[in-house]
Image: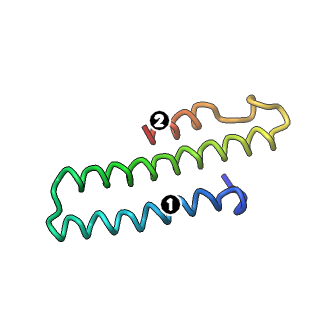
Amino acid sequence: MDLEPTEMKAIITRMKRAHGHLGSVIRMIEEGSDCESVLTQLAAVNKAIARSGYAIVATGLQQCLAESEDGLESVDIKKMEKLFLALA
């Protein structure tokens, strides 16, 4: 699936933020922060990454539907379902 760079900009920005946030979580662990704080921040990173994945799949599906001549018939629905479930 080739996705347009302009469509991916927001997703890339979100993932870069998650990357930086993960670095903060690692520092928290190294500095001995309490478990509750670490797990709360780690959950936020996990959610940001998952949302990025969903956005990538949704953008890809939208592009496939827009480019296909036959609508859903040319989209591999099982493959898309598998991609969504892989993120769950």
Indicate left or right for 6 with 78 as reference: right
Picture quadrant of residue 74: top right
Is residue 87 or residue 35 the one in the foreground?
Answer: 35
Q: How is the image coloured?
A: rainbow
Q: Earlier in the sequence, mark 2 or mark 1?
A: 1
Q: Amino acid at mark 1?
A: Met
Q: Amino acid at mark 2?
A: Leu
Q: Reply above or below: 84 against 32.
A: above
Q: Reply above or below: 7 against 55.
A: below
Picture quadrant of residue 24: bottom left
Give the residue number, with chain letter if any, for mark 2.
85
Q: Which mark is residue 36?
A: none
Indicate left or right for 51 with 36 as reference: right
Q: Look at 27% across and 66% down and name the residue there.
A: 26
Q: Reply above or below: 62 against 7.
A: above
As drawn, the residue found furthest toward the top would be 73
Q: Look at 20% across and 64% down and name the residue there.
A: 29
Indicate left or right for 35 with 9 as reference: left
Give the residue number, with chain letter if any, for mark 1.
15
Disc 1 is placed on an element classified as helix
Estimate the x, y position of residue 76 in percent, counting from the top left.
65, 35
